[in-house]
Image (tube, rainbow, N blue to C red):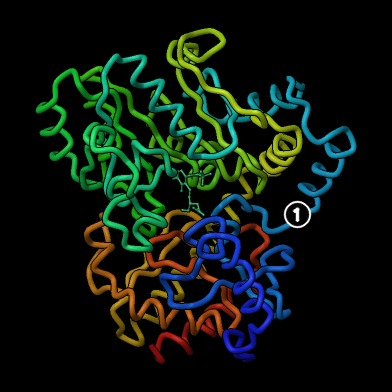
């Protein structure tokens, strides 16, 4: 196969220029390929399960814009919805009917949400949810889990996953000690620890925020009853349970992880898929909590482009294409890939774990089970780097970090899986 990493002359030129103007040459750190000792590719086109870089190299894409593109790149129904919306204007800064339609679709599939507010990113939605939790409970402390990532607002940057884990940042500069002191970070899947901690701070914890299936340490499923126990514990202590479903919302089911694990959180964070690749976020939940938001209540939150007509139109088209068959297909194509990888691992007797929930998966280079951030960090990131580079050189574009999820879309076909497995077999024995 063409060695794409050497034939990336145009990307290298563009990267050099970008670095003169943009910190690290990127507008989001995980795209920098820094963790995999490579320079980022500059993408020029994307369609279905494929992306092309500035040197016309073609890849099978398992990043899918970090999750939003459940139907693959530039699905005609999504692009048509955008074009139709565009013909009616770009932004009104005023209410429009499609905001109601998107809210109706989300609430239909996520009955825990009685009221929903659209924003422009997952970060904004998390920031708003924490503000609401503190206002509703009149408490300050937040419990989060190491390796989970909830966007880059100050309260949730300690011991985070995704880019913080990828770049090995101990914590984030610029977050005040005061702010950091209000956030308690505990190991995921360790309920006893949460129970002990909450009882140590009676009436001080406003909320527990969790990725119900972690994507940002690499994929880590909840152990049996972990989420149910968190629900019971938070109820007992009158603090809120916040499900960050930015990744899992409409990824794992029509609705989210809350439908699969049958948990009713007090607040839910959404993003990614509900915008179909356009900028969006949402916070939703119980009416009595959500109606604290201005203009009804004292919790202020706003956004110039919140509910933007183009994002909303793309989100409606994306969600309207989802049905039970979507998830049946995603389960079959994802299990074909991941079960076949497991078979190859057994044949080649290598130290690789693969965690998968639905159409999100991570290949960890470690001999031990990955059930929390500490165990995911035991992965050999040097081998992962060689693996990533070799897969890329052979046209397979995986998330450029051991601590991220890879995604499969309905546009990934069996031939893509077969090619990926052939490359995997060749590469895994080499690394
Ligand atoms: P945004 O602000 O990036 O829209 O959403 C933040 C966020 C919140 N919650 C979860 C569970 C998330 O995964 C994210 C963002 N995910 C990362 C990748 N895992 C986005 C990619 C990036 O940072 O460039």
Residue 206 drawn at (x, y percent)? 28, 23
- Please state if 24 lies on the left or on the right of 315 as rendered: left
Residue at the spot 43% in from the left edge and 60% down from the top edge: 404
Q: Which residue is mark 1?
A: 75
Residue 366, image quadrant: bottom left
- Please state if 344 lies on the left or on the right of 230 as rendered: right
Q: Quadrant of the N terminus?
A: bottom right
Observer-nearest residue: 9 or 177? Answer: 177
Residue 11, image quadrant: bottom right
Residue at the spot 66% in from the left edge and 39% down from the top edge: 319
Q: Quadrant of the C terminus?
A: bottom left
Residue at the spot 60% in from the left edge and 62% down from the top edge: 21
Q: Is residue 229 visible?
A: no
- Please state if 266 lies on the left or on the right of 408 as rendered: left
Residue at the spot 31% in from the left edge and 62% down from the top edge: 168
Residue 299 drawn at (x, y percent)? 46, 15
Residue 282, image quadrant: top right
Reply above or below: 206 against 258: above
Residue 333 drawn at (x, y percent)? 56, 64
Total number of numbered labels? 1
Residue 354 drawn at (x, y percent)? 37, 67
Observer-nearest residue: 40 or 412? Answer: 40
Local crowd at mark 1 within 10 Å, few (<14), some, or many (≥20)?
Answer: some
- Please state if 43 lies on the left or on the right of 262 as rendered: right
Reply above or below: 343 against 275: below
Q: Is mark 1 within 8 Å of ligand 1?
A: no
């Amino acid at each position: 196969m063409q060695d794409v990493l050497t034939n990336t002359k145009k990307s290298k030129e563009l990267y050099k220029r970008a670095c003169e103007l943009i910190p690290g040459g990127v507008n989001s750190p995980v795209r920098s390929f820094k963790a995999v000792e490579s320079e980022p590719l500059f993408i020029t086109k994307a369609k279905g399960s494929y992306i092309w870089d500035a040197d016309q190299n073609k890849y099978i894409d398992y990043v899918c814009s970090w999750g939003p593109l459940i139907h693959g790149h530039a699905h005609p129904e999504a692009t048509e919805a955008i074009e139709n919306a565009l013909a009616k204007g770009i932004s009104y800064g005023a209410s429009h009917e499609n905001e109601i339609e998107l809210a109706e679709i989300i609430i239909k599939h996520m009955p825990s949400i009685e009221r929903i507010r659209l924003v422009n990113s997952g970060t904004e939605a998390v920031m708003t949810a924490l503000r609401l939790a503190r206002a509703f409970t009149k408490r300050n402390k937040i419990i989060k889990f190491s390796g989970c990532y909830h966007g880059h607002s100050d309260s949730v940057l300690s011991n985070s996953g995704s880019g913080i884990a990828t770049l090995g940042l101990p914590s984030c500069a610029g977050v005040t000690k005061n702010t950091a002191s209000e956030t308690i970070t505990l190991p995921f899947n360790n309920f006893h620890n949460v129970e002990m901690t909450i009882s140590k701070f009676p009436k001080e914890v406003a909320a527990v925020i969790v990725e119900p299936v972690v994507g940002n340490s690499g994929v880590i499923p909840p152990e049996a009853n972990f989420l149910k126990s968190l629900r019971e514990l938070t109820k007992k202590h009158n603090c809120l349970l916040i499900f960050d479903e930015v990744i899992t919302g409409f990824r794992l089911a029509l609705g989210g992880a809350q439908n699969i694990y049958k948990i009713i959180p007090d607040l839910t964070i959404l993003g990614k898929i509900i915008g179909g690749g356009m900028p969006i976020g949402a916070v939703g939940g119980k009416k009595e909590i959500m109606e604290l938001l201005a203009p009804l209540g004292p919790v202020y939150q706003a956004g110039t482009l919140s509910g933007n007509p183009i994002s909303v139109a793309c989100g409606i088209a994306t969600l309207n294409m989802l049905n039970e068959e979507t998830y049946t297909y995603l389960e079959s194509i994802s299990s074909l890939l991941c079960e076949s990888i497991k078979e190859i691992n057994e044949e080649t007797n290598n130290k690789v774990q693969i965690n998968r929930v639905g159409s999100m998966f991570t290949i960890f280079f470690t001999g031990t089970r990955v059930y929390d951030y500490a165990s995911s960090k035991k992965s050999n990131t040097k081998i992962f780097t060689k693996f990533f580079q070799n897969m890329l050189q052979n046209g397979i574009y995986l998330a450029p970090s051991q601590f991220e999820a890879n995604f499969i879309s309905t546009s990934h076909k069996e031939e893509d899986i077969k090619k990926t497995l052939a490359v995997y077999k060749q590469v895994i024995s080499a690394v």
